[in-house]
Amino acid sequence: MAPPADPFEITDDPVPTDPQPARRTVVPNAYLEGLNEEQRKAVVHEGGPLLVLAGAGTGKTRVLTTRIAHLLITGRARPSQIVAVTFTNKAAREMLDRVASLIGGAADGMWLGTFHAIGVRVLRRHAELVGLKSNFTILDTDDQTRLIKQLLQAEGIDDKKWPARILSGIIQRWKDRALVPDKVSGDDAGEFANGKAVEIYRQYQARLAEVNAVDFGDLVMHCVTLWQSHADVLAQYHRRFRHILVDEYQDTNVAQYLWLRLLAQGTPDVCCVGDDDQSIYGWRGAEVGNILRFERDFPGATIVRLERNYRSTPHILAAASHLIAHNEGRLGKTLWTDLKEGERISLKGVWDGDEEARTVGEEIEALQRDKHALSQIAILVRAGFQTREFEERFITMGLPYRVIGGPRFYERQEIRDALAYCRVTVQPDDDLAFERIYNTPRRGLGESALRSLRIIQRAQKVSLFEATRRALETDELKGRQRKSLGDLIKNFDRWRAMLDGMTHVEVVETILEESGYTDMLRMDRSPEAEGRLENLKELTNALQEFDTLPAFLEHVALLTDNAERAGSDMVSVMTLHAAKGLEFDTVFLPGWEEGLFPNQRALDDKGVAGLEEERRLAYVGLTRARKRAYVSFAANRRVFNQWQAAIPSRFLRELPAGQLAESSDAGLYATYSAGHHGGLREQASGFDYESLGVTSVGRSRTRWRDETFDDRRAVEGDKPDLSVGQRVFHQKFGYGRIVAVDGNKLDIEFEKAGAKKVLDSFIEAA
């Protein structure tokens, strides 16, 4: 028996000539049962372009697959006359399965896949027209970077100053905009690689053609170029495809938009499904304007709004709809549901990030006691570094969790690198740590240098660090290798000595700076670089909680193993970006503070457009929740060893008070509603929380005082008289007694937190 056909197989099936596709034999209209009025209208629409504005949880996938089935069942199209575009191969296969179940058999011949998968099919057929052969290869990221590095070196450009990986990212962004080298403007090119970025791009494309290869961005850009320059080829696809369907249209970039516009010239039957309120990938090239201009691009278009939500409770939907209504760049819709009212949104203000994690953990334990499945609980953060406090807390509690869309905090590359530096500083005989970072950042040390060190190590039975020290006393190492390793050994000796005279936090900050590690990330212009720097800042925050560097390293090493087990019940922790498309019974949304959410970098880079995308992220976060949503914000955040007063996110005043739980900090909303909030930026420090009426915060249930960590009392000279033996209170650590006084620094034995060193400005007499 022959194996089933691969739906993604590239074949040379001819352009169909039968003008009257056969109707399929199925139960009449059975596939339409269960659709609501708007869904049915979208499925059976005929005669012209169609935009389906599908709100969160409104059944857009069902509409798309049922529409394909409708075209086939009614005989409006043969499978080979349909092209349907998704954004992941997984989604494409799921759609194929759904269509097959609706029509009672496989839809053989239909082109259904991602833009890139379909692009491959087109380019295999016409490779010679874009300077390739049909058996071209597709380079992965490492191959792209290696090729660009070779070109940089040939031009005499310093790869350390202008990393190949960064230029690769720049080139891919140009390709996302369908910019071939000749179309890149001077403003786009900038000064990267001494102003030679465009020339390197031109050489890169020529080299790809020489080796008969493409990269990921070429798969769409080459199609656009092919269709723009060969009208006869484009006409073939116009004759072939009668129906074009595109999912997640709000996430398309410029090249994908041009691809669609060119292909759509051959048919009026274009159906795009998307949600302008969920366009959250602008940082990777998505253009929300593509969906906003649909009616202008396709005159006479019909817009069907899917507003009936099957996921969330009325309170959650009302809050999300009220929030997103503050965006001006949207086509507009309001979600509704006939589900039971459910719980109102809970809002909680806390003292700092540690208390936020503790409060969330306690709430999850309460839900767990009520038989709530942990797998139906998610914590959605704006920035990756926020996961650290939750991970630490859950490990302490023994609460199983998984980090979705990325490694756990202490498993991230930059954190493991930083910890390796710390381990070698504390214990120079740690060979694994030394080997990890001896050439990170790059110091011109390759495998040959490492082999020489290992020979000495085995012969003299010493550690790699000691082998390096001994190699420097001989002539085994030459030139740049000798200097680089000599500088590294001296640095480690100096950093180790600094532990006797400086705090361990200051020493780690010095290590990260002097090693060149933070500079390496600052020069990295990839979208991930900023998050990696934030993770390093969060690492220094974690260090604050330990008296010594060895104590911290021991803590990290002894963290309870929380490896994922198939089918296990775990809380999901992820960023808001990673949560799109998912849903949970209960969702926690921490860190709703200005600068963090909305993210200050997004505001600085894109202004109003950045703010609106951040608001769409908030909307996505709220609409992931089926039954419960918890929003929290902190009065203080510790950023790179500095406490900073925080103020609530502007998004909080955009949540309607009527949808909030009575236990929430209602005074905050009354204040916001009255317009008291005023200029957010001007109040970025010393914010008057007492005027917000926040009277019960966190476990201590104490009133937030006016003296936030900007320390107004210290400024005004209103310090309490404190002495050894005195009982005192600290907002974070609770009650304790002073055991030593050194100027403004106090050693206090806290009743629950144990011995801590604190500043007197954070203490009040009990």
Image (tube, rainbow, N blue to C red):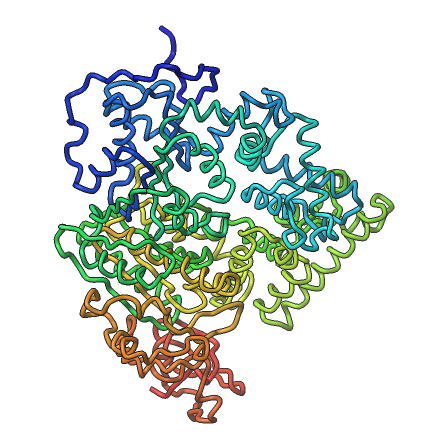
- Spot the residue most to the front: 300
Image-quadrant location for residue 390: bottom left
Q: Is residue 762 left or right of residue 306?
A: right
Image-quadrant location for residue 22: top left
Residue 702 visible in the snapshot: no
Quarter in which the C terminus is drawn:
bottom left
Is residue 273 depicted above or below 377 in this figure? above
Image-quadrant location for residue 29: top left
- Spot the residue most to the right: 475
- Whole-percent x and y of residue 614? 41, 59
Q: Is residue 529 left or right of residue 516?
A: left
Is residue 102 depicted above or below 729 in this figure? above
Which residue lies at the image location 32% right of the left edge and 36% below the top edge?
Answer: 48
Quarter in which the N terminus is drawn:
top left
Is residue 743 depicted above or below 306 in this figure? below
- Whole-percent x and y of residue 123? 54, 25
- Whole-percent x and y of residue 628? 22, 56
Is residue 242 depicted above or below 469 in this figure? above
Q: Is residue 553 left or right of residue 388?
A: right
Residue 159 visible in the snapshot: yes
- Whole-percent x and y of residue 17? 39, 15
Which residue lies at the image location 24% right of the left edge and 64% below the top edge?
Answer: 346
Q: Nearer the viewer, residue 185 or 667?
A: 185
